[in-house]
Each structure stands twice: as structure tokens, then as C-alpha cells.
């Protein structure tokens, strides 16, 4: 089943290029817009699975549209397309729960992979963007963990002991060990001594 999609871009050529591409690939394109206000109205009325939005648009930016969708708890997953390789925008996109971020120069090459990932509930950010910003992306296993398990990994990365983590989280050291055991299972580590600590240290740039 193809996801229902709307697209919005104030550059006619880019909008046409994307429209033609998605139609050619037989995606379920249910609407297009030339500014942020139109885009938001389309999302609110049609509630598509995915909205592909330019960041810089008249009336509302792609980020502002995404923020309004989040505040109204609309189910549409947002993908941003942009020429911007900007860490501030990237971090804001992450904060407001953007699912995809594709650079326009790679849009046609990457958009299918991005849509496929986002439709399954996974995020997709242009590898070139991540490389350019030199951002440490969390390992894939990160998505499998509960908020408490993630918090424990962050505390391990800051060199806290099991007892100290228990104090911080207001749980017993035994509960902390149980969480650690669950984490080891989820990320498929061996049960060798310190295997979790080694894994955290290898990935600690993502946790700190």
C-alpha cells in the first residue's frame, strides 16, 4: 500500500519535478501547495500519511507547519526538503519530531528511501547532511529502547555506577541491573562483563 502524500514548495520547478516524480512512481499524491498556509490547510483537511514540505515558504515555514501539526496532534509525518545545511534547523527539526530531512540536490535520489522509512515510522535524514554537520547519529538499536533505558545509557555514558543511577532515578540498584539486562537483550550484546559499558563508550557521542 502506498502512503497518501501532500507536497508543498514555493518554487514551481521543484514542485513540478517532485509532483511528476511521485506520480510516475505511482505514489498516492492527494494534494500540493505553494505556501505554508495552504500546506497546513491541506494537512488538516486531508490528514495524509506524509507531508513533504519545503522549509522556506511564504506565510508559514515548513518548521512552523510541523510545529502546528504537532501541537494539534495531527497524525501526518513530516519530511522537510531544503538546500539548508544548518545545524540549528536540524536540531529544531529533531526537537519537534520531524521524520525526514532531505537535501534538495539529492531529493529525487533519496525521496523514495525517505518515504519508505517514514511510512514505517522510522526517521530518515540525508546522509550528506549528517556528514556535513558531523553529527553523531544514535545507533539503530536506540529506537528499540524505552525512555528509562535511554536515560540509563546516558547516565552510564557519564560514568555513573549502578548504585548512583539508582539514586538518580529513585529506583533500587537491582531494578537498574534488570534494565541493563533488558538493554543488552534488545541491542543483542553478548553477556560478557562490561559489554554494555564498551558499547556505550563506542557510541557515547550520541548520548551525551
Image: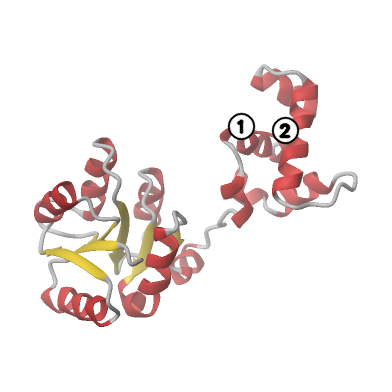
Disc 2 to disc 1: CB gap under 8 Å: yes
Asked whether the viewer can see residue 161, the reply is: no
Which is nearer the eye, 162 or 47? Answer: 47
Disc 2/disc 1 C-alpha distance (Å): 8 Å
Q: Is residue 129 above or below residue 147?
A: below
> Residue 56: which quarter of the image?
bottom left
Pinpoint residue 136: horizontal percent, then vertical percent.
57, 57
Q: Which residue is mark 2?
A: 179
- Name which residue lies at 47% across and 62% down: 133
Q: Is residue 84 above or below residue 148?
A: below
Q: Is residue 181 above or below residue 125?
A: above
Pinpoint residue 80: horizontal percent, then vertical percent.
30, 60
Judge left or right: residue 172 versus residue 31: right
For the C terminus, the quadrant is top right
Label total for image: 2
Residue 137: image tag: none
Judge left or right: residue 114 versus residue 155: left
For the residue labelled by badge 2, is the local secondary structure a helix, a strand or a loop? helix
Q: Which residue is mark 1?
A: 148
Which is nearer the eye, 55 or 29? Answer: 29
- Name which residue lies at 30% across and 80% down: 25
Which is nearer the eye, 88 or 52? Answer: 52
Amino acid at each position: 500500500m502506498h502512503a497518501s502524500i501532500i507536497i508543498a514548495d514555493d518554487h514551481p520547478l521543484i514542485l513540478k519535478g517532485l509532483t511528476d516524480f511521485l506520480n510516475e512512481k505511482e505514489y498516492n499524491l492527494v494534494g500540493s501547495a505553494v505556501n505554508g498556509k495552504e500546506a497546513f490547510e491541506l494537512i488538516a483537511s486531508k490528514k495524509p500519511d506524509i507531508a513533504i514540505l519545503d522549509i522556506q515558504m511564504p506565510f508559514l515555514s515548513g518548521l512552523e507547519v510541523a510545529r502546528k501539526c504537532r501541537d494539534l496532534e495531527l497524525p501526518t509525518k513530516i519530511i522537510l526538503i531544503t538546500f539548508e545545511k544548518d545545524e540549528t534547523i536540524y536540531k529544531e527539526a529533531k526537537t519537534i519530531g520531524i521524520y525526514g530531512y532531505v537535501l534538495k540536490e539529492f531529493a529525487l535520489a533519496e525521496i523514495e528511501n525517505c518515504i519508505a522509512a517514514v511510512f514505517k515510522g522510522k526517521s530518515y535524514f540525508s546522509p550528506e547532511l549528517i556528514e556535513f554537520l558531523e553529527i553523531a547519529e544514535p545507533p539503530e538499536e536506540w529506537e528499540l529502547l524505552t525512555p528509562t533505558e535511554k536515560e540509563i545509557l546516558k547516565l552510564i555514558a557519564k560514568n555513573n555506577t549502578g548504585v548512583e543511577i539508582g539514586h538518580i532515578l529513585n529506583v533500587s540498584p537491582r531494578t537498574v541491573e534488570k534494565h541493563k539486562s533488558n538493554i543488552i537483550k534488545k541491542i543483542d550484546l553478548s553477556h560478557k562483563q562490561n559489554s554494555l559499558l564498551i558499547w556505550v563508550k563506542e557510541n557515547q557521542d550520541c548520548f551525551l
